[in-house]
Structure formats: C-alpha cells, structure tokens
Amino acid sequence: MGLILALYTIILVFIAISSFRRVSTVADFFVARKGASTLAVTGSLVATILGGSAIIGAIDAGSELGAASAWFMIVGALGLLALLPLAKKAYAHGRYSLPDLIENFYGHGPRTVASIVIPVAWTGIVAAQIIAAAKLLQSFVEIDYFVAAVVATIVFVGYTMAGGQYSILRTDFFQAVLIILGLVLLAIFAYVNGGSDFLAGSTAHKSFPFNENFGPLTLFLLLLTYGTTFTAGPDIFSRLFCARNSATAAHSILFAAVVLLPIAGIIGFLSYYGASLEGGSGARIMQIANQVLPAFLLPLIGISLLSVVLSSADTTLLSSSIILCELLKKRKGDGQGTVQSLALARGMIFVNGVFALVIALYFNDIIGTLLLALAVYAGAFTVPILWGLLGFRSKSRYVTAAITVGGILALIGKFASTVAELPTNAVLFGDALLILAFVVNGALLYLGRTKA
C-alpha cells in the first residue's frame, strides 16, 4: 500500500510541476485563463462535490439513515439543476470568485462581508478534509496522526500553490475517475457478496425514500441548507468561472448532475449495506471494502478515498484563498499579471493551509463541522445570490443585514437541531430557526429592493 501511495503522490507532483510552467498571470492561477473544456469543468465539479461529507460521511450515516443517505447526492444533483437556467447569467457577472458576483449585484459593502465570512467558514471545511485524509492515511500505513495531517496538508497545499486552477482542474478529473471507479467496484462486490440477499430482507426503518430517522421535514431542511449550496456555493461558482464560455459552464452543470444521480443510488446501497456490519472502527466504507473486496483491490479503494478528500480540499482551499487575495491586494490599475499578485495568491494559499492544519490538529469532528459551515453559509448567502441572479436588486445596507441576520439565525438553529442532549422541542425550535433564516433574509432584501 505504501508503494501505491508513493506513486499517487508522484503523479500529483508531476501534475503540479507541469501546471506551474503554464502559470504566468493571476488569471491563469485563479481561473485557468477561462479556457477549461466541458470535460474538465464537469470532472472538477464531480470531484469537488464527491468530498468527504458526500461519500465517507453519508455512508457512515447509514447506521442511522439507511438507504435515505442517498438523498445527500440527490439533493446535490437537484441543486445543480436549479442553477442550470441561471448558469449563463452567473458566468457573465462573475470574474474570479463569488464575492465578485455579490459586488456586481449590490456594491462593495456586501462584498466585504462575504469576503470575510466565506473564508472563515471554508477554512473549517479544509480542516475537515485534512482530518479525513489523515485518518485514511493512518488506516493504510502505521503513522502518527500529526505526521499524517502534515503530510496531507503539504500534498494538497503544494500542488494548489504550484499551479492554482491548472493543477486542480487536471487532478480533479483524474480523481473523479478514481472516485467513481472505486464506488462502482465496491458496490458490485458488495452486491455479489450478500448484498442482493440483504436488500431482499430490508426493513422499513432503513428504507428509501423515508424512514423513521429521515422524514419529509428532514429532506426539506437538507434541501434548504445543503442542496442550496450546490446552487449558490462558492466552490461551484469557482468551477464555472474557469469555463471557456457560458455554454460550457451550463453544459458542465447538466452533465455533473446526471453523473451524481446514479452515484446517489450507489451511496444509498452502500450506506444500507454498511449499517449491517458489526462494530469496527474507522470509516464505514473501509469496513465494507475490507469485508467484500479481494486484497489486490484494496489499494485502489484507498487511493479512491484519498481522492475523495483531496479533490474537495484543494478546491475549497483555492476558493477561500482567492477571496482573501482579492480582499487584501491593492488595486493599482489592472495589476493582474504582476509577480507580486502571484506571490500574494500563493502566500494566501499557504497561510490558509496552515490555519486549516492547526484546526485539524485540535478538532476531529468531520461531518458536524462541514454541515454546520454549509448551513450557516446557506442561511447567509443563498437568497441574496439567487435574488441577484433573478434580476432583482437591493440597497447595500439591507443586503449586509440580510447576510448577517440570516447567518446568525442559521448558526443558532443548526446548533440547536444537532445537539443530541437537547429535548425534542428545542430541536424543533432549531429547525424553525433554520427556516426562519431564509425567510428573514428574503424579507430584508425585499424591504430594501431597488430598480435593477
């Protein structure tokens, strides 16, 4: 397994070096000169979406949710399809990052708020991916957690710093293929090794689409706080802005959504199957792999799972670093091709990676951190982004208030709805606050509306 990991790392280093040679301007680094093909953008979207929370987290949740874990990817596909009719407009209004879009719609004030809030949340998501990568490395080779976390950080920070979007677009397609191949092989072997009998004897409390632990309200909240991040999330837009034209951006969204739907079925099946396994430690997907796969295929699954976390970590890291770079740099003319600008961009990636590593060394709650950050982001930004894309405009101070109040309500609501020790009434109150975050957000935008 160590040899396979070394080979995988060598491939990433080769891609980083070749990408480094192609980067001469910030436009190269941030959006790969806006020259990415449909295949490249689709592969990057799929690899980014199939992150630790989508696969490792969803299958781990199988013990509670059963086959309903498939909803994570179905909701993601629905979120992409909701963006499809707005994709060309988003591409036209965007430049490098999501705050560019917000500034075009509402002015400098809301952009500044977004440029502070998003990187803070996204650094936590990068940290969650470091945690997942470190734990996966520990399950493959005997290595201390600290060392594993540092190694994982060095790898994806290094190749992200080297080539920016060029590195990410090339590794993402490669990683998307590995992820899908690993999931398909695992599902086939699980089905052959008792999975078909297991499905035939399935029980209602683990069934799809709903069961005792996943009802219509849970689905609605998942659509609201998770699915909307696929419609208005910074990572999704950062992929679109790399496309060579608006048609490429739209086609990539459609193809990515189509790819996600069968993957949702595979995840639902593996979640249901994994729930039947007794005890064990580590990621549930590795328990399934160890039980059903022949030994010679285990390294492939290991590399596939590392691709799961790395493909999300690099995109998330670059997205937040671009936003901070744009916030901090001094605008002198255009200034996009200077060495100083490239140095700043790479420096922000390094600093962001170090902060994420520090968080990863002190915290280990992967899924909770991810879903909390996404819920707060959705409560703060989804409505203003969609409001702007639909052609509406609002006064800057109302947009700032909507982002702030929506984010705070979503934070409190998500916390209350996920703390197991709280009584049922408190959980329901938390769910109500999550919904209220979107209502209040929209109401403030409506009160401050202006002519477009």
Image (cartoon, helix red, strand yellow):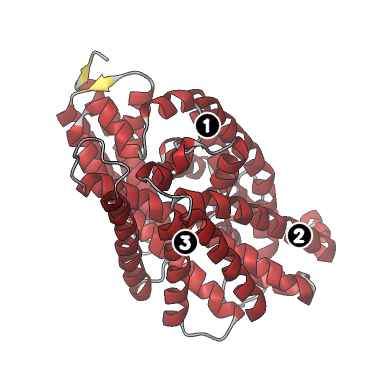
Q: In which quarter of the image is the C terminus?
A: top left
> Which residue corresponds to the image point at 23% horizontal and 34% vertical from the top-left?
402
Which dot, 3 or 1, sits closer to the camera? 3
x%, y% of residue 344?
Answer: 28, 54
* In this rendering, position of residue 424 left or right of residue 282: left
List the residue tagged with mark 2.
185
Q: Distance between the residues labelled 2 and 1?
A: 30 Å
> Which residue corresponds to the image point at 80% horizontal and 63% vertical from the top-left?
189
**Furthest-left residue in this view:** 397
Which dot, 2 or 1, sits closer to the camera? 1
Q: Distance between the residues labelled 3 and 1?
A: 24 Å
Decide: is 227 above or below 276.
above
Pick the front one: 73 or 124: 124
Decide: is 431 above or below 129.
above
Mark closer to the chain start, 3 or 1: 3
**Dot 1: element:** helix
Amino acid type of the residue that numbered disc 2 sits on in the rendered structure: Leu
Label 1 Cα neighbours within 10 Å, binned few <14 / some 14-19 / many ≥20: many
Amino acid type of the residue that numbered disc 1 sits on in the rendered structure: Ala
Q: In which quarter of the image is the N terminus?
A: bottom right
| Rendered image: mark on residue 249 | 1
Pick the front one: 349 or 56: 349
Decide: is 390 above or below 149.
above
Proximity of marks 3 and 1: CB atoms separated by less than 8 Å:
no
Amino acid type of the residue that numbered disc 3 sits on in the rendered structure: Tyr
Q: Distance between the residues labelled 2 and 3?
A: 28 Å
Pick the front one: 206 or 172: 172
**Dot 2: element:** helix
| Rendered image: mark on residue 159 | 3
